[in-house]
Amino acid sequence: MKHLRSDYDSPWKEILDRYFKDFMAFFFPRASREIDWAKGYAFLDKELQRVIRDAEIGRRLVDKLVKVWKKDGSEAWVLIHVEIQGYKDPEFARRMYVYNYRLFDRYARHVASLAILADDNKEWHPVSYGYKLWGSHARLEFPVVKLIDYAANLDALYQTKNPFGVVVMAHLKALETRHDSENRLNWKLKLAKHLYAQGFVRQDIIELFRFIDWVMVLPEGLEHRFSEELMKDEEEKKMRYITSIERIGIQKGIQKGIQQTIRKLLLNGLAPDEIVKLLDIDMQTVLAIVQPSETEH
């Protein structure tokens, strides 16, 4: 297992983009209740990148800045930090402080800084950063959620309809089975089957399956067993989790299988809308292949 790459950054970024409302309801219910979700929300990637570029402090992983509206009609910004590394980061609290004051200074917006700690260090739990000098006192306190704290209540994760129940279980089991490939295989199968049992719609099954597959990397032989056993379960229950071509793409962490097939079909003269129907995929996936090809010419 030590030679396998478990890349947690990209799946967390994708899952936050797709399920931000569920993310807030699951991890920060108090804040979620005060947000007027009917007005929607917007990711402020450019604004955050400007602040990050200016700050340049320490290692960054998953940082998201989101504009929301409170129920009283006022605008608020939510700064989300997801720290994945498995060790104590002495710069983390300071980074929370710096990002917060830089955003306030540059844009004059109230910023709520929220943190998810996905490491396995039980002793590390930063909640504030500040300093004092000659009677002057500057300080930022921020809510922190530690994922390993959910390990004591897996039943609740298993029963919730919120997609982050699956996300947290997959992350915890990925940490727990880092040195036990057989156990990881068993849990990966259990979680994949759980997606359908929970009644998620097909697109959610695909998205959550991608997250599970991304963080629970298996050796090639066990990955093959995983696919065979999942397909067998599908046949017995007469349920289709995802198409075979989607599974090929997801298992590689990105949809390489789909991309290659789309390219071949395009070369054979099929139109994008025909490919969408043939492969049962969305148009965006096809256009992502078509547009670069046109640019190259």
Image: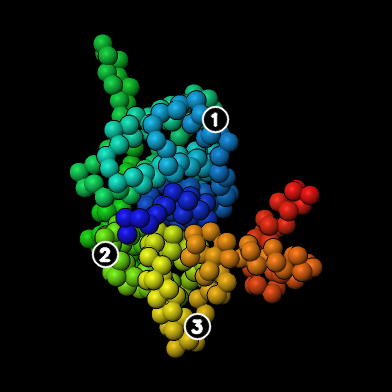
Mark drawn on residue 239: 3
Mark drawn on residue 50: 1
For the residues labelled 1 and 3, the Cα–Cα distance comes to 47 Å
Amino acid carrying label 2: it is: Asp
Q: Residue at x 30, y 15 (%)?
A: 136
Q: Residue at x 39, y 71 (%)?
A: 221
For the residues labelled 1 and 2, the Cα–Cα distance comes to 42 Å
- Up-down: is 124 above or below 176? above
User: In front of the other: label 3 or label 2?
Assistant: 2
Mark drawn on residue 150: none
- Circle 2 residue: 180
Q: Position of residue 220 (x, y in %)?
A: 41, 67
Most distant residue in the top direction: 134
For marks 3 and 2, the one nearer the N-term is 2
Amino acid carrying label 3: it is: Met
For the residues labelled 3 and 2, the Cα–Cα distance comes to 29 Å
Q: Are marks 1 and 2 in contact (CB under 8 Å)?
A: no
Toward the viewer: 85 or 5? Answer: 5
Toward the viewer: 206 or 178? Answer: 178
User: In front of the other: label 1 or label 2?
Assistant: 2
How crowded pointer 1 is (Cα within 10 Å; few <14, some 14-19, many 20+) is rated as few
Q: Is residue 253 visible?
A: yes
Q: Residue at x 47, y 51 (%)?
A: 10
Amino acid carrying label 1: it is: Arg
